[in-house]
Amino acid sequence: MVTPNILAISGSVRAASSNLNLLKAIENRLPPGMLRYSIGVDQLPPFNPDLDQAGMPVPEAVATFRRQIADADAVLICTPEYAFGVPGTLKNALDWTVSSGSLNEKPVAAVTASPLYTGGDKAMASLLPTLKALGTRMPAPSSLCIPSINKFLSAEGTFTDNQLAAQLQQLMDHLVMRASEHSIHS
Ligand SMILES: Cc1cc2nc3c(=O)[nH]c(=O)nc-3n(C[C@H](O)[C@H](O)[C@H](O)COP(=O)(O)O)c2cc1C
């Protein structure tokens, strides 16, 4: 059986990002090679429909991002919350997938992680309708807000809260299962 592949998209572009560290911790718990990383969302130009006309070539980074999504059996988004919303760079990247339909019918899971007790819940509340508009498939459990990420994830990559760790495991098991189904049927 072919191992499904999951594309990880980090909503943070910081080198020392806790969301990126969380993705790495998730990657270490998956079979080798299952999780791949998208290009940085900061590499995509500002979305402009004038650069997104049918039959015209799109900027190279956009083509790469779309191809990475198309090649993935599922997508995992892990993002911080900025100013009570989705980071502009992540929203910009998602806007580039509207006309291409790259995420249409794609199994997707979304995680917000924040040092605050709210866990980035307002970013999640904004992200989910966007992903719905893009045609993603997100049956529960497909989203999780992780509060106090700096305490939850140690420098060694261990999870300190058993209940949250179990929720994250459940979310990933579910995504891998849906990725396998997508892989088989595509
Ligand atoms: C300009 C700015 C705005 C922020 N706004 C929020 C916010 O609205 N909600 C929140 O939970 N954290 C907010 N934070 C804190 C981020 O969650 C924190 O910096 C986090 O570490 C960023 O994620 P990262 O470590 O993956 O880069 C903000 C940080 C900055 C610099």
Image (cartoon, rainbow, N blue to C red):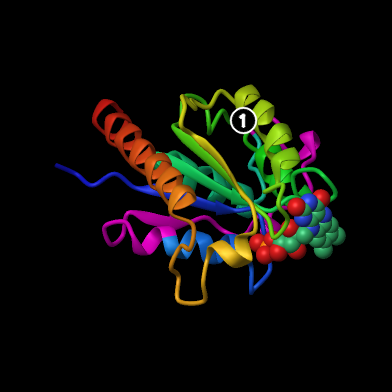
Q: Is residue 147 above or below residue 57?
A: below
Kind of residue at badge 1: Leu
Q: Residue at x 53, y 27 (%)?
A: 136
Q: Main secondary structure of the magenta part?
A: loop
Instruction: Tell whether 134 sits left or right of 106.
Output: right
In the image, the residue with mark 1 has its CB under 8 Å from the nearest atom of ligand 1: no
Q: Is residue 80 above or below residue 108?
A: below
Image point 14% across, 42% down: which residue? 1
The spot of residue 109 in percent (x, y) is 50, 38
> In the visual, does 131 lie left or right of 155?
right
Horizontal and vertical percent position of residue 110: 55, 41
Instruction: Please tell me which residue lies in front, 147 or 21.
Output: 147
Q: Which residue is mark 1?
A: 131
Examine the structure image and report whether residue 117 is included in the region drawn in magenta.
no
Give the percent coordinates (x, y) of residue 177. 30, 35
Magenta part of the protein: which range? 26-55
In this view, 43 is above or below 141: below
Task: Report whether 108 appears left or right of 71.
Answer: right
Magenta stretch holds residue 34: yes
Q: Secondary structure at mark 1?
A: helix
Question: Residue at the spot x=49%, y=35% of the render?
Answer: 108
Residue 146 location (% of width, % of height) = 59, 50
Q: Quadrant of ligand 1?
A: bottom right
